[in-house]
Image: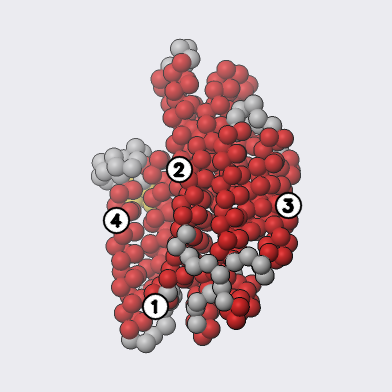
Amino acid sequence: MGAVLSVITSATLVFGLIEGRSYGWWLARRPFSIGDVTWPFEISVIPVTFLITVLSGIAFVWWGVRRQRAGKTTLLAFSLFRISSFRNGNIAALIVSLGEFGIILSLPPWLQNVLGYDALQTGFVLLALAMGAFVASGVAGALGNRVSPVTIVRAGLLLEIVGVTGLGVVISAQASWLSVVPFLFVYGLGVGLATAQLTGVVLKDVPVDKSGQGSGTSSTARQIGSALGIAVLGTILFTSAGASLDTRLVDLLDVPPAVRAQIVDAVVDSAGSAIPALEQRSPTVADAARQAFSDGTRYSAFAAAGFLALGFLATLRLSGRVPEEQQTDAAGRAAAAASASPVSEA
């Protein structure tokens, strides 16, 4: 039952965040159908989806606490959330993952559909992120015995914020890979410093016999954060791009309203893939679409930086130095944890 409630909660939340712009946040913009069954009401299916999220989430917590009090196993170790470092660390991990994974979604469509790079060229540009993480992993290991893990995490998050904010500044329809790569490298440095160390910080006060559940809970928090990041920042990207393109097309007096709506829907629904085809029909409209999609990507980057800043603030509630006798144990559990990172997911 717990697994079913967990799936329902996660699936409905992510579906609502991703599809809200398509089906309407309150009133229905388009029909919602499953097979031959069509949603019959004027209100959008999205508010109902969010209501299901809340109800199933409450039921999941109730079911888990009930089983825990009965001495039975649970999907999440709810009792561990009484530990301050575990609770605050998982909150920080969730928020950080939200910012980290969302920006990885936004960049490839912009690089390919606005700057015109192919998949291989896009991969080479994003390789700067992996290189930064690779360099930082060695630095983090060298610093581990001299600097507290929390300090390393905070330094990594600051680098991530600088990198993502820099991306937001340089992103434009006229940008080149030369302006993007340095900030991706800085961002990768931050990811390499923060990701592994944060897992150790989360688990440092968890009893050894509960370390398996603690590791699983930490990984779950990151996976939920990554899913929310893709949903939230994806919504910001496409909503901003659509609004910007509509505004730009209004300034083109020769574009009728009906055609304008079709162009906006085509660009947004295709994640920008329709932009190259617009070039053959109307270079002016294609240029407006490139600028609008760049606007959306830029806003998405700034939003990611904001979430990372919230994650940094969350780490301020974490304690500083880990006692020496716990460092080796925490490091071993951190290595064993199935922790996700945007480099491995990319």
Depth check, mark 4 against mark 1: the one in front is 1
Question: In the image shown, does 200 or 223 lie closer to the viewer?
Answer: 200
Instruction: Determine the CA span between mark 1 and mark 2.
Output: 34 Å
Instruction: Determine the CA span between mark 2 and mark 4.
Output: 19 Å
Residue 198, given in percent of the width and then of the height, sits at 56, 64
The quadrant in which residue 276 appears is top right
The quadrant in which residue 321 appears is bottom right
Residue 307, given in percent of the width and then of the height, sits at 48, 49
| Quarter placement of the N terminus | bottom left
Position of 268 with respect to 180 (left or right) is left
Instruction: Determine the CA span between mark 2 and mark 3.
Output: 29 Å
User: What residue does disc 2 label?
Assistant: 235
Sequence-first tag of 4 and 1: 4
Element under disc 4: helix
Does residue 218 appear in this view?
no
* Label 4 with label 3: CB-CB less than 8 Å: no
Question: In the image shown, does 311 or 281 lie closer to the viewer?
Answer: 311
Identified by mark 3, the residue type is Met
Q: Is residue 117 above or below residue 192?
A: above
Question: In the image shown, does 290 or 69 lie closer to the viewer?
Answer: 69
Depth check, mark 1 against mark 2: the one in front is 1
Depth check, mark 2 against mark 3: the one in front is 3
Residue 312, given in percent of the width and then of the height, sits at 50, 54
User: What residue does disc 4 label?
Assistant: 51
Does residue 69 appear in this view?
yes
Residue 88, given in percent of the width and then of the height, sits at 44, 65
Identified by mark 4, the residue type is Leu
Question: In the image shown, does 101 or 267 lie closer to the viewer?
Answer: 101
